Image (cartoon, rainbow, N blue to C red):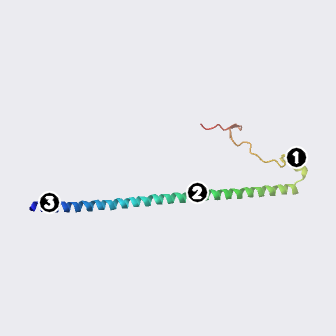
Amino acid sequence: MESWGSFWMGLGVGWLFGATIVALWGLWRAHQAKKAGRSVEALEETHQRFREEVNQHFVETAELINRMTDSYKAVFDHLSEGAERLVENRAVQERMPKVGDQEVKLKHIGHRVRFDGGSEPDEPNG
């Protein structure tokens, strides 16, 4: 009979030991999952902050370009007004190209400059 008691006692101790190991393993896994969840959340927050910073950067860039454009226009207007007041009409007519109220356009956009001074159209990539 004593052997049955030892058997049950060993079984109980083994079961208690196994349950403790499984519980500790479960706690460790839960901690790891929580840690990984925090890591993912941290990455998402970092990514969101980065996107907001990029958006802000381009908004500021657009504002700066608008200010720069306004500054160039102010310089152009200043030079134009000065030319009208200070330069004789005959000198302006002889030396300045006839543009009137036409829009200024850049002719060479989309062309590569060759070393011989000419230009050729850009070829599509492909």
The amino acid pointed to by label 3 is: Phe
The residue lying toward the viewer, choosing from 24 and 102, is 24
Q: Nearer the viewer, residue 84 or 54?
A: 54
Across and down, in percent, residue 97 comes to: 83, 46
Percent of width and height locating residue 35? 40, 61
Q: What is the distance, in whole Å, between disc 1 and disc 2 at their CAs?
A: 50 Å
Q: Which residue is mark 3?
A: 7
Please identify, in this view, whether the residue under mark 1 or under mark 2 is nearer the observer: 2
Q: Secondary structure at mark 2?
A: helix
**What amino acid is found at the position of numbered circle 2 in the picture?**
Val
Question: Is residue 120 positioned above or below 45 on the image?
Answer: above
Relative image position of residue 99 (x, y in whole percent): 83, 47
Label 2, on which residue?
A: 54
Secondary structure type for disc 3: helix
Residue depicted at x 77% and y 58% = 74
Q: At 41% from the left edge and 58% from the top edge, which residue is drawn?
A: 36
84 relative position to 23: left or right: right
Q: Position of residue 19 (x, y in %)?
A: 26, 61
Quarter holding the C terminus is: top right
Compare marks 1 and 2 and give the one earlier in the sequence: 2
Tell me the number on the disc at residue 94: 1
Q: Looking at this view, is 53 or 79 the one in front?
A: 53
- Secondary structure state at the residue bearing disc 1: helix
Q: Residue at x 48, y 58 (%)?
A: 43
Foreground disc of the pair 1, 3: 3
Q: Residue at x 40, y 61 (%)?
A: 34
Q: Tell me if mark 2 has few (under 14), some (14-19) or many (20+) residues whose alpha carbon lies within 10 angstroms of its own.
A: few
Q: Quadrant of residue 26?
A: bottom left
Dots 3 and 2: beta carbons under 8 Å?
A: no
